[in-house]
Structure formats: C-alpha cells, structure tokens
Amino acid sequence: SKEEKQRLRKEKKQQKKSKEKKDDKESHVSSAPPAVPAPVSNSVPASEVAVATEKPTKSKAELKAERRARQEAERATKQTKKGEPGQQGATGKPKAPPSELQPGMVKRLSEHVQVDDPDVLKKLAKKLERQQIPLRSDYGYKVSLFSHLHQYSRKAPPTQQLSIPSTVIHPAIVRLGLQYSQGIVAGSNARSVALLHAFKQVIRDYTTPPNEELSRDLIKKCLFYYMNLFPLKKFVFFLINVTYRVFFNTIIFLIFPASAKKKRFAKSKLLTSIEWYIKEKIILAATAIAHSSIEKISDGDVILVYGCSSLVNNILCEAYDKQRKFRVIVVDSRPRLEGREALRRLVQKGISCTYVLISAVSYILPEVSKVFLGAHALLANGYVMSRVGTSQIALVAKAFNVPVLVCCETYKFCERVQTDSFVSNELDDPDDLIVTRKGKTQLAGWQQVASLGLLNLVYDVTPPDFVDLVITDLGMIPCTSVPVVLRVKNVDQ
Amino acid sequence: MNEEELVEYFRAQMRTDPDMASAVAAIRTLLEFLRRDTGETILGLRESLTWATDCLKGEDSSVAVSSGGELFLRFISLTSLEHQDLSRCKKVMEERGELFLEKISMSRNKVAKLCHTFIKDGAKILTHSFSRVVLRVLEKAAMEKKRFSVYVTESQPDAAGQQMAAELAKLHVPVTVVLDAAVGYVLEKVDLVIVGAEGVVESGGIINKIGTYQMALCSKAHNKPFYVVAESFKFVRLYPLNQQDVPDKFKYKADTLKKRQNLSEEHPVIDYTPPSLITLLFTDLGVLTPSAVSDELIKLYL
C-alpha cells in the first residue's frame, strides 16, 4: 500500500504539473512554511511574485486565458463532487486577482482591506460560494475614510445562513467565529487562547485521509479554517497581526517536527506543544510581567487604567497582595464600557477605585502619578495598537508629564508597521452607538438620513513618543526597542 | 579577604590613582578579591563576589560602582560553564578579569577620540561639575590645537566645578566658573553642552550630579546640542520614570545612607535626565542616540 500511495501521489503531481503550471508552482511554494504568510500579510515576499513573473508577459496572458478556461471546466465538475481538500489547498488562499500580477509589482493587498473595490468583492463572493460558506454582507453606510474595511451587524450572525451540518468548516471553528463576532470572547489574551483551543479540537478530530501525508494535509486544513474565520465573522484586525503569529508559530512550525517522528504521536505532540505555548507565552509571561511591574508601583501611587486589560488587572491585584498602598482610577468609554468589568474585578479584590468616562480624563489627570495601559499588539516601528481611546489617554498624559507604561507579552510583538489608525482597523456594529436617553432614541433612524454615518472603531495606534516604558516578560524596554526584541526572538527560533 | 581589607584596598586604589574612575577601582578590588579567594565551589565563589560588590556599594554608593561590579560578574561568570576544575576555572576567570580591566581602561581614550571632532575651532562649551571623561575629551581637543573656551558650573554642595576649572587652567584652556543658577543666563553664549555621566540607564537617560537635568532642560529650550560622554561599563539596568523613581540608594552618599534615618531631610546628590533631552551619547561602543542605548544594553545583558 505504500507503493500504491506513492504511485497515486506521483500521478496526482504529474496531473497537476501538466495541466496547471502556475498553480503547481504555487502549491509547491505553499507547502514550504516560510512562504505561507505571503497571502495574509501585506508584505508579500517577492519570491512568490518572482515565481509568477518568470515567464514573459505575452505568453503569460495566453496561458492564463487557457488555464482559466480549464479551471472553470474543472470546477464545474468538481462542484458536483463537493470540493476536494486538494483543490481547496491551492485556491483557499486569498490572493489579489491575477490581473494585478504585473511584472515589477511587489505589494499585494489582502482582500480584507479592499472592500471598496467591487472586483475584489466579486472574487471573494465567488470563492466563498464555491466553498459553500455564506457571504456576510456589509451593513449600513460606511464613512468614506474607512470604506475599505468591512462593517457587519451583530444582528445578522454569520451562522444564520450556514447549513447544518457544515461539512466544510469544523464546528469548533464556527463556534469560535461566532464567539468573536458576538463579543462573547473579548480581549486579546482570551481570543488567542480561544483560537488555540479551537485548533486543538480540530487536531483532535483530525484523521489523515488515505492518500495524504499528515503534515501537508493538516497544514492545508488548518490554513483553510483560519482563512475562513474572516468572512465567517467580523474581520478581527488583530488576527492578522497577533493571532496569526500565534497560529503560525505554534501550529505550522510544530507540525513538521511533530510529524517527522512517529505518526501516532504526532497529534499528541502537537497538542502538548500548543498547551506549552499557552502556558509559557501567556500565563507565565503574565506572572513575569507582574513581578517586574511591582517595582514601578510605589506606596501612595494613583494609577490610571483604561478599559479592561487582563494583564493590567493581574498586575494591580498582585501589587495589592504584596501590600502596596495605591488607588486606581478606571477610565471607561462607550459603547463597549469595558471599564466596568475592570472596576468589578478590582473592587472585588479590595482596591479603592474611582470611575470616570474618557471625557473627564484631563480633569483627573493632575491627580494621577502613573498610567498603565494594555496593548493588543506592538508594531515593529514602536507604535502600540490598542483599544480605541488609548492614544487619547497617552496624549493627555504626556501633556501633563505623567509617565505612561504599556504592559504587553512578547507574543504580541509583530513585524507589521503602521503609522495611523486608518489603513487597517476594525469597524464594529454601528448600531451600538444608538442609545436611548429619557425615553428618546435620537439615532434610531440613522440609515434614512443620507449624509449621516455612524463610526464605531475598535482599535487605534499610539506613537512611541507618548509611551515611556514597555513592560514585557523579557524585562523593561523603551518603545523603540521592539524591533530588537523581534530580532532576538527570530534568532532564537 | 574580609570587609575591612576589601574597603581598604578600594580606598587605596582610589588614592594611588585619582584619575581612575571609581568603577575601575571597584573592579580592580574585585579582581584582587577573586585572586585571594579560597572558596571551594563556583557557586560559593559567585556568592562571595556578590557579597564583595555589596560591600563596595556600601562604601561608594554611586551608580557606576554598581554597574561596573555587575558587568564584571557577568563577564567572568560565563567561564564557569566551560571548565570542570575549580582552580583552572579561577585562573581563566582571573585572565578574563584582567582582559576586562584592560578593555575598560582604554575606554576613556576611545570616547575622547570620538568626541573631540565635535568640538569645532572657536567653540564655547558648557559643562557641569567635575568629570574625568569630559576632561579627557577637552584635553584631546586641546592637543589637536583647537581653540575653545569653557564655562563650568560651580556644582554645589561640594564645589566640584572649581576642581574642574583648576584642571582646565593647567591645560591653558580659558575657563570661567559660573553659578549653578546662571545656566540659563550663560546658555545663549555657548555652542554646545558636554557632560559626563555616573550611570546610563536603559531608557537612554543618564544619572549625573544634581543640576544636570536643569542644564538639559535649558539647552533644549535654547536648541543647543546636549552631549553626554560615558564609558560602556556605566550602563545599568535601571529604568526610572521620573526623579522620584530613582532608587534612594543612589541618590545619597553612602555615609549619609548609613547615618541618617529620615532621608527626606537630606538633599539628593544626583538627578535623572530623560532621553528626550539628550542629543547624543559618546561611548566606547560608538556614538549612540538615546534609543540605541537600549539595544546595546540588550546585547550586553541578555
């Protein structure tokens, strides 16, 4: 049967080679992990494009036309068979339409920041149809500055149109997507852990199909599920930065060594590796950060926190346990009002707290001695990506000369560079901004007013000049040293 | 070698060569301690070295002694993993210690070589208190036949500025001593400000004699470049957020810490200058911007 397997594999490869030259090259490139981040991140490695631009332009167009015709024919036949994993592996990657692959063009934008381009939308719709995943339509008028991003309504959950049982996407992933979109799982650490648990379930339920190799097929499947988290639920921007790296570093990097050893133990090894990752990078890191930050909290301090960051809450509780005398001011903002959760946790511990809304921040800042902020990601140029409102607080704190400390685990560091909050962000449900006061709901009919748009942003970026110190599990570093840490980490890996 | 001998040796080193930095004297003392140590285990050796460093910190509370001691420990303790035999290990440690000492005694000259080119002919320089590194830099510039004049602040409470003025007069450099309060007054006349540092912290800021922060703020307001000259063994793993955040053990002299209980009546002898006010740092590792200091520290310590 081993020879049979090999023979079948060879045949398949030959078929692919003879028919689809280009697709074959892509799938070869995709089977090597380093090229995998290409479709998702903005900075596409030139290698993939170089591969595509090897042929002269003239014959390329002809070949493309031929290939497309063949592909359509094949898809028509395959549609009846309910899409094979092999095909999905090659096509399940969000790529820009081939017409954009001009020689010399290096950058390729992800589809998810091209929502205002109708061609891209059509491609996405077709692709999802093929894979039998319902397309989620945008809701409401989008402010022009953010028209390149998706905006979904929470009232139309993605699973409404999803057939049961869904054979294409694993139910754990569907559940994860739903949890993300309904806001049941909120906060970056919680989301990362939920993602990893969902993938652990996927791996547990996974069985290698008869003609496939464990590592290749599992990677394809996992990638496919991961990519489809996007249309399935809201586009969670930070997924592209942080959880992508989490996902990549754990699952992709660990699959090959795990499967190199005995096939039986590959799955269990993979599961333990994921658990180890969670334990070391998230749980132990929190302890290390709490340990370092205790030094920065002195008796008599007045500490300002914004929103609900699990890490900052942990630090404050630890400091309280170590008999430090301080009080906390919790700043909150609509529409999420996450500060209330933080307030609840701190008061339960016994810490004396004050609660204000973000509009009062310049009023209370003269009393404050330090500001502790959490982060969703730390970008390579030193910018801090966090909940919207964080850069506001950092700005006002700087004006009052109050030190700003950001607490962030190293797994949240990413190679992405961003200088403003527009280019890549997340638009939450605009209906969240509607509020009823004194029996009147002023914005109820906002969709009828043609010139009115409601903007509910989720993230913003804070420049490094406003941040005095970043506390990570590696120690205390200035904001500008993030690329050094990334370099050191890459060397380690 | 017990505590008195240690402290006496340290004091003797400082007396014999007044030009030596206190950190270098501390490292020499530690090296001597290592030679005379009769411990049986490597862990015991390391513990006794830590104890010795603490004794020295009790004698001279400056940041430089603390950082120098820590770096020395790091430099030699990397050998403990390579050799099994204790005596061989000790020998290698001693050799490495000598090497380290040699390297850092060259550091002042390296700094002077880098910095003197920034002093142009006809420049007017402002400096603060007595710093041997700054003196070395100005000496080198004078040797290169540059004509410049220097303003030195008096730097109370110990009037160290007068000592600096005397040294500069020996080099035939025109020098004027000004009051600490006259920094703002004199800044419009000067072209650049050069100060030394007792310690360089992780953020890229410096810890130096009290009055440096003021000078840095004024030079920023006047848009004059503020240069810091420091050897690399002064890099320390501290990260103060503001003046209050600097640990008390560095703020006051060692004997004050031992004698007085209520430190709030004492006046601190050092202050912290944040990196945003510093233009460049000249070290034996090269000319660095304040944000590059953290990179260097990560390389040194991690």
Image (cartoon, helix red, strand yellow):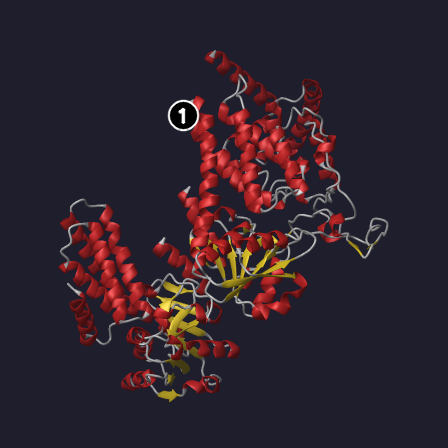
Element at label 1: loop
Q: Position of residue B149 (x, y in %)?
A: 38, 85
- Label 1 marks a residue whose chain is A
Residue ID for mark 1: A261
- Give the number of marks: 1
Residue drawn at (62%, 27%) of the image: A88
Is A227 on the left-hand or right-hand side of B125? Answer: right
Amino acid of disc 1: Lys
Q: Position of residue B13 (x, y in %)?
A: 19, 72
Q: Position of residue B74 (x, y in %)?
A: 28, 55
Is B104 on the left-hand or right-hand side of A180? Answer: left
Within-10-Å neighbours for mark 1: few <14, some 14–19, many 20+: few
Is A193 on the left-hand or right-hand side of B83? Answer: right
Residue drawn at (28%, 83%) of the image: B167
Q: Nearer the viewer, residue B3 or B216?
A: B3
Residue drawn at (57%, 55%) of the image: A347
Q: Position of residue A342 (x, y in %)?
A: 59, 53
| Residue A106 showing in the rendered view | no
Which image quarter holds the N terminus of chain B?
bottom left
- Picture quarter containing residue A79? top right
| Residue A245 showing in the rendered view | yes
Q: Nearer the viewer, residue A173 or A185?
A: A185
- Picture quarter containing residue B62? bottom left
Is A285 on the left-hand or right-hand side of A430? Answer: left
